[in-house]
Amino acid sequence: MAKGVSSASRSVPVVLVCLGALLFANVLIYFYIESLYQSSETHVSLHGNCPPGHFKMGVMKNCSPWLQCPAVRKEVRKLKMIGQGAVKQVFLSEWKGHKVAMSKLSTPKYEDDFLHGLAMLQALQGPHVVLLVGLCPEDHTFITEYHPLGSLLNLDSVLAQERYRRLDTWQTRLRLALEYVSAVHYLHNSPVGTRVMCDSNDLEKTLSQFLLTSDFHLVANDLDALPAVDQAKGRLVKCGGRELHGDFVAPEQLWPHGDSAPFSDELMPGYDEKTDVWKIPDVARFLLGRVPGGDLAHFHLFQIHGECKRRDPTLRPTARAVLGIYRTVYANMMKDNPSPSSRDML
């Protein structure tokens, strides 16, 4: 009998040790996943350490106030045009040895759009938005950080280059998809209210709104069409059109009257930020590409992507909910299959 009591007493510490080890392992896993979340957004510190109205880029050690008109006119040297759209022209330029992008109004017709884009750049500065370097509203000019890899449209061609081929992995691509969803979530919960990406009527146009940084993160760049949504006041967005078509366009963006009435903005149904959620699966499909392991990411995201494509926008998840799923999928896949190249980039 004494032996039985002795054995039982010895087994208690063993059980406690096992429970302690299990708890310790769970804590380690928790901190590991948290570190992956933080690693997936290391670009947060790229220009987040400067106070509002200041910037720091490249090898700059200290933050500098945004350049104002006198400095923009005198210190920024225009080199060559690198892009042109309906609203603005973009020039590769130089400021004190730094390559920058100078944006200038293309035509007076779109002055309001240009100034709206500039206002959004000022208000939304942070890890998800291109760095603002200077501005001169009276000259219809502003300066941003230059990213030589260009827009997300170039992703496949960039990763096909010999110097970047080792980065063409599901780890890199899934992280970019996560950052895209994170940017959409930020716009929907921004310091200046809920903002909808109005200028995103097809996949190519949507991808062109984002730049690919040299360390393979993404930042929103073209903010000319970010109207506000205010459900409480019944203020919805109307930026669809009769000519829109295809699976990329959300149903609520389509002209509902067929040929029975001429197109007018007044007759377009209003909609909210859930139209951006509809487009997440299409953007993610492009970003994930066709790399080994990408099919597993698609599998894990299949259910949430199906929810994003519900025809009734009220039944779609929020960008916050989608982001939560993406973070979980990314963390779990990275835990099971980390790679040296992905660690280098993170």
Image: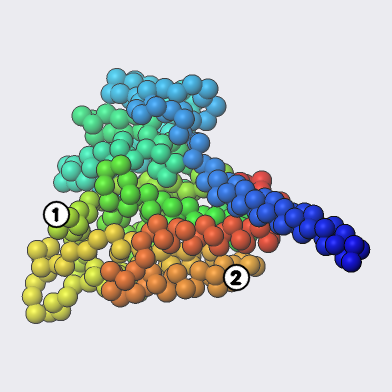
Which residue shows up at 55% across the image and 27% down it? 59
Q: Secondary structure at mark 1?
A: helix
Label 1 Cα neighbours within 10 Å, binned few <14 / some 14-19 / many ≥20: few
Residue 227 image offset from top left, x and y in percent: 23, 51
User: Who is closer to the viewer here, 38 or 94?
Assistant: 38
Does the image show residue 166? no
State the residue at coordinates (87%, 59%).
6
Extreme residue in the right direction:
3
Quadrant of the drawing holding the N terminus: bottom right
State the image quarter where residue 261 is shown. Answer: bottom left
Q: Amino acid at mark 1?
A: Lys
Q: Which residue is mark 2?
A: 296
| Neighbour tally class for label 2: few under 14, some 14-19, many 20 plus, Cα within 10 Å | few
In depth, the one of 286 and 63 nearer the eye is 63
Residue 8 image point, x, y percent: 83, 62
Above or below, 125 against 241 in this view is above
Which residue matches tag 1? 233
Type of amino acid under label 2: Leu
Residue situated in front as seen by the camera: 95 or 9 = 9
**Residue for point 38% across, 59% down:** 319
